[in-house]
Amino acid sequence: MQLNAANGATVEVSDAVFGADYNEPLVHQVVTAYLAGARAGTKAQKNRAAVSGGGSKPYRQKGTGRARAGTTRSPLWRSGGKVFAAEPRSYAQKVNRKMYRGAVRAILSELARAGRLAVLPQWQLAAPKTKEVAAKLRELSVASALIVVESRDDPLFLGARNMPHVDVATAASVDPVSLVGFEHVVCTEAALRRLEERFA
């Protein structure tokens, strides 16, 4: 399979990675699982056993005219415990390696088919200047983009961090959520080869 590069040339890529069928249910499941795994799951409340105090009966059982009460930490009382108290939990969903790789291949293939994957020979900045990143994206007619490079490039990371609809990732850190979260993916040729090795 061939992809058109920004300089007018064509780049030969693997059909297995960039020519796969789009499996929407699989992509949805993997993206949902990835987002769920990012949830902290630290919400916590106290039930009547966890609230301190309430050891003694607040008043005698009979003769007061009031309802029976054995503790002031009942959920019916002010400062009492919660009836169905929330507890810390994990939202992680199981996604095996084959599913994950298949979903990323489907996303990359769909980006290539839709013309949303731009390939550059290289992308290097002499200085961390946002205007240089913006100018390059204007040349590509791209407003919202994930820039994928082979390895961490500090000037590029610093130059793009001020742009709300632009993010930079290395080929080793690309994930399904970042791939579907931007209108375009701008990838260097070296990063393209790394992606082929990672998801082949």
Image (tube, rainbow, N blue to C red):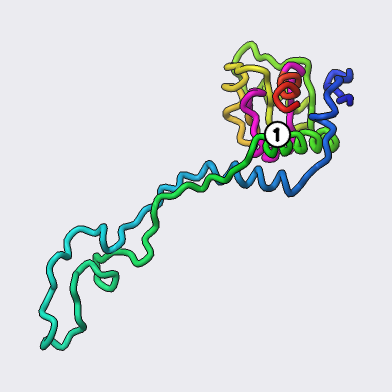
User: Is residue 71 placed above or below 114 in the rendered structure?
Assistant: below
Where on the picture, by quarter, is residue 129? top right
Residue at the spot 68% in from the left edge and 25% down from the top edge: 148
In this view, the residue farthest toward the top is: 126
Residue at horizontal 71%, vertical 20%?
A: 194
Residues rendered magenta in the picture: 168-190
Q: Quadrant of the C terminus?
A: top right
Compare residues 120 and 97 and report the one nearer the observer. Answer: 97
State the image quarter where residue 195 is shown: top right
Measured as percent of width and height from the top left, residue 47 is found at: 31, 61
**Nearest the camera: 117 or 137?**
117
Query: As rendered, which of 99 and 87 lies closer to the eye?
Result: 99
Indicate whether residue 119 is drawn in magenta.
no
User: Element type at marker 1?
Assistant: helix
Please tell me how crowded label 1 is: few (under 14), some (14-19), or many (20+) other residues with Cα within 10 Å: some
- Please, what is the three-letter code of the amino acid marked with disc 1? Arg
In percent of width and height, residue 86 lies at 39, 57
**Residue receiving disc 1:** 101
**If the image is split into quadrants, where does the N terminus sit?**
top right
**Number of marks present in the image shown:** 1
Tell which of 199 and 114 is nearer to you.
Answer: 199
Left or right side of 165 for 7: right
What residue is drawn where x is 72% and y is 28%? 199
